[in-house]
Image (cartoon, helix red, strand yellow):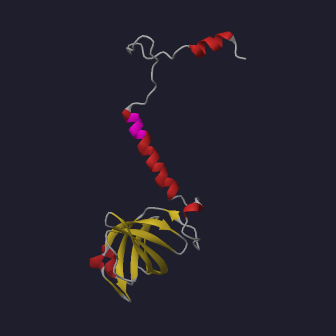
Amino acid sequence: MLPADVRRSLSRPIAGPKNHARSEGSHPVLSFSSKSRRMKDAQGYLTKIVNNHSPTLEAYALGEREERRLNLTIPVYVVPALGNVVDVAAAKATVTKEFSSIGFSVILDEALGTDEAVVVMAWDGTTTYFRGDVKHQSPIGAGLWQCGIQVTEIVPSGEYPELGTLEI
């Protein structure tokens, strides 16, 4: 049993702000401001997005992948390629989305339109040129596409001198 003074304090109405007017006999209503509620709603929505895209939540997996992915955003250029020809004029400045030990995905404003690409990336003070096979291209909404590229080789910087015009 609770002590008498605790029981008395629990039976009293909660006091509202000093300048808050309320009618005699009414009890205050605890409410969040609409700004606070909107912020909570927004944070709840972002939490759903994070949870639905978490690599640790297997319930949302479409199937087992052969390798683990790392969400990592790095600015890159994606240059369409066909054999030994690169189309620098069609290069797209964009960002990566995910990395794995065999490749990465990039976000584009349209489908790439080729089965091969050279990706120009600056990392740790060095520019690197990766040649790769386009494995998938999927629309993700708002006119954007996710393009998965499996790396086949690192291209020596002198092999395509025209790539040197692309500065990251």
Q: Position of residue 139 (x, y in %)?
A: 37, 70
Q: Nearer the viewer, residue 29 or 39?
A: 29
At a point 46% along the width and 54% down the height, the residue shown is 49
At a point 36% along the width and 74% down the height, the residue shown is 78
Q: Position of residue 147 (x, y in %)?
A: 41, 73
At a point 53% along the width and 63% down the height, the residue shown is 70
User: Looking at the image, is 48 positioned above or below residue 96?
Assistant: above
Q: Nearer the viewer, residue 137 or 38?
A: 38
**Identity of the residue furthest to the bottom in this view:** 83
Q: Quadrant of residue 24?
A: top left
Residue 5 visible in the shown view = yes
Q: Quarter of the image containing the N terminus?
A: top right
Is residue 157 inside the magenta stretch? no
Q: Quadrant of residue 73?
A: bottom left
Residue 167 visible in the shown view = no
Q: Which residues are the magenta region?
A: 35-39
Q: Position of residue 140 (x, y in %)?
A: 38, 66
Q: Nearer the viewer, residue 25 or 44?
A: 25
Q: Quarter of the image containing the C terminus?
A: bottom left
The secondary structure that dominates the magenta segment is: helix
Q: Quadrant of residue 38?
A: top left
User: Looking at the image, is 55 positioned above or below residue 28?
Assistant: below
At a point 41% along the width and 13% down the height, the residue shown is 18
User: Looking at the image, is 93 positioned above or below residue 156?
Assistant: above
Q: Position of residue 136 (x, y in %)?
A: 44, 77
Q: Nearer the viewer, residue 124 or 7?
A: 7
